[in-house]
Image (cartoon, rainbow, N blue to C red):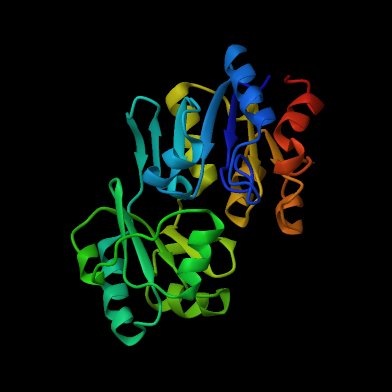
Amino acid sequence: MVKAIFFDIDGTLVSFKTHTIPESTRKALAALREKGIKVFISTGRPKVLMMKAVGDLPFDGYITLNGSYCFTADDIDIYKGRIPEEDIERLIQYHKQRPDIPFVFVHDDTWFITGVNEAVQQVADLIKITVPPVCPIEEARGKEIMQIMGYFKQDEDLEVFSHVLKHCEPMRWYPLFADIIARGNSKSHGIDKVIEYYGIDLKDTMAFGDGGNDIPMLRHAGIGVAMGNAAPEVQNAANYITTSVDEDGILNALKHFGIL
């Protein structure tokens, strides 16, 4: 029996085409809550951008920053997983050699970026967000950094994660950049922390996603549902493939499993 459902935002709840949540999804979420099923966000976004994306829709809790920061609807912290300060220091030194790579640092409810280039603007336009304020990378020292976003492509991962961010790993859902979190954090880890807090068994969970960073939770949840607009490797990680976000994918999957 499904008691908790976890939803990615971009490409799952929110359409890349309209940048809105389909009406069928809004009604489905309301119906789930009326039935007593808990609904949670599970996103790579930081808190400040998550709230803008979901608007006034109520949720029982939130997994943000790819599982690095989890909290309840009442802003009670469930879990925080910060990036080690030694990795931050190595990145500061590395950036002196590679100032061409912009990095975003997320701490508390704020964030900043070291510089802006075409890739940064392209991603901001894709998900309709404002570019963070530009600050020197040294501003990351001494702060509780829970996620970094690095605007470099996958072929540079080996260099960055072998020699610089040694205790971190990338979560990619778009080729121009990587969400970077402390190793061991993930959306699946976030699910474990949330269900432990609420006393829910993993077998009674369901998750919806469409991006590469959703693969861990789709494999981990009791039922993993990939959106029809998801890449093949994401669909291969799921128990079920529904229609796209723009074709009522969430409602259709809930009906398929007899939840609604």
Picture layout, residue 257 above or below residue 179:
above
Does residue 183 appear left or right of residue 11 in this picture?
Answer: left
- Judged from this view, the residue extending furthest toward the top is 35
Depth check: 74 or 113 in front? 113
Does residue 122 appear left or right of residue 147 in this picture?
Answer: right
The answer to whether one can see residue 235 in this image is yes
Depth check: 222 or 110 in front? 110
Could you tell me residue 33's position as x and y percent? 57, 17
- Judged from this view, the residue extending furthest toward the bottom is 97
- Give the quadrant of the N terminus: top right
Does residue 234 appear left or right of residue 185 in this picture?
Answer: right
Q: How many marks?
A: 0
- Give the quadrant of the C terminus: top right
Identify which residue is drawn at 46% across, 45% down: 67
Could you tell me residue 249's position as x and y percent? 74, 37
Does residue 178 appear left or right of residue 70 in this picture?
Answer: right
Identify which residue is drawn at 62% across, 12% down: 35
Could you tell me residue 142's position as x and y percent? 18, 59
The answer to whether one can see residue 226 in this image is no
- Judged from this view, the residue extending furthest toward the right is 256
Could you tell me residue 144's position as x and y percent? 25, 53
- Judged from this view, the residue extending furthest toward the left is 142
